[in-house]
Image (tube, rainbow, N blue to C red):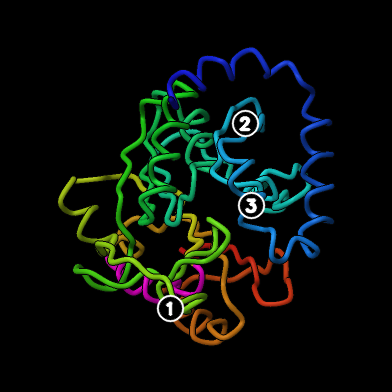
Amino acid sequence: MIPIRLKRCKYILGLSQKLRYSVATILSYVEPYVGFYGSLINKISRDLIIAYQDSVFLVPDYWSIRYFDPLDEAFVWRYMNIDRGVFIDIGAHVGKYTVIMAKKLKNAGTALAFEPHPVNFRYLIINLSLNKVSNVLPFNMACYSSDGYLDLYIARESGLHSLVRPRSGNKIRVKTCTLDSIIEKLHIDNVKLIKIDVEGAEIEVIKGAIKTIVKHRPTIIVEVWFSNIAEFVKLMSKLNYRIKVLSTGPDITYIVAFPRC
């Protein structure tokens, strides 16, 4: 069914992005009132197509639309300006950053994408195909401080699954790896930029990437939970990185970390 849908998607992409983002805005206002009917809306709005930054994305639920608001995370894109080397997307979701950065890099670089949830990962693979992106190495696993297996707690929204915070009674077992182990195994060189969005597990991700950070000195863009900020700043200071706060929300802070040397 999905391949057929993807072919049909080509015919509806003439709709303006302005209209798409208006729909996203409307849904963001509707969400607080969804309540009990959330699961029903989810079922009738699966496989939405979104046009974003000259790319096309298939998403699994209407909540995913919020991640493609043109005003959202504009402050992040300012620092995602590499045109060569390796980009690493940890917590890739359905591939928004992966696809766009891979297109920017083209033949001059590669993207690595880590997404542990099997459904999100399936959409990630579809979106790579939709956008004819071939310079991506996708991994259906979670980056962490050790190789092994952990419970991934399932949230209502596809972008909020977490290794550290139970959001419901649902969980699945997922494979974990350190970024260092993957980089060493694949002999990856010239890591320029790392993006981390892992719903509270950012400290563990950094701990599993120490060798990579020390060797390659990449710029690191991270969504940090408030409960982790002090430890994150201390850890990055030890690695000789300076911190710049990009945006602060109710529970999270977006931070970019630059190597001092």
Q: Secondary structure at mark 2?
A: strand
Looking at numbered disc 2 in the image, what kind of residue is underneath it? Ile
Q: Residue furthest left?
A: 185
The residue lying toward the viewer, choosing from 238 and 57, is 57
Mark number, residue 164: 1
Residue 87 higher or lower than 15, as above or below:
below
Q: Disc 3 vs disc 1: Cβ atoms closer than 8 Å?
A: no
Q: Residue at x 33, y 61 (%)?
A: 142
Q: Main secondary structure of the magenta part?
A: helix
Residue assigned mark 3: 40
Q: Quadrant of residue 178?
A: bottom left
Q: Position of residue 145 (x, y in %)?
A: 29, 73
Q: Is residue 175 left or right of residue 95?
A: left
The crowding category of the residue bearing disc 3, from other C-alpha atoms within 10 Å (few below 14, some 14 to 19, many at least 20), is few
The residue lying toward the viewer, choosing from 159 and 146, is 159
Q: Earlier in the sequence, mark 3 or mark 1?
A: 3
Q: Position of residue 70 (x, y in %)?
A: 75, 42
Residue assigned mark 2: 49
Q: Residue at x 73, y 15 (%)?
A: 14
The crowding category of the residue bearing disc 2, from other C-alpha atoms within 10 Å (few below 14, some 14 to 19, many at least 20), is some
Looking at numbered disc 3 in the image, what kind of residue is underneath it? Leu
Q: Residue at x 51, y 69 (%)?
A: 199
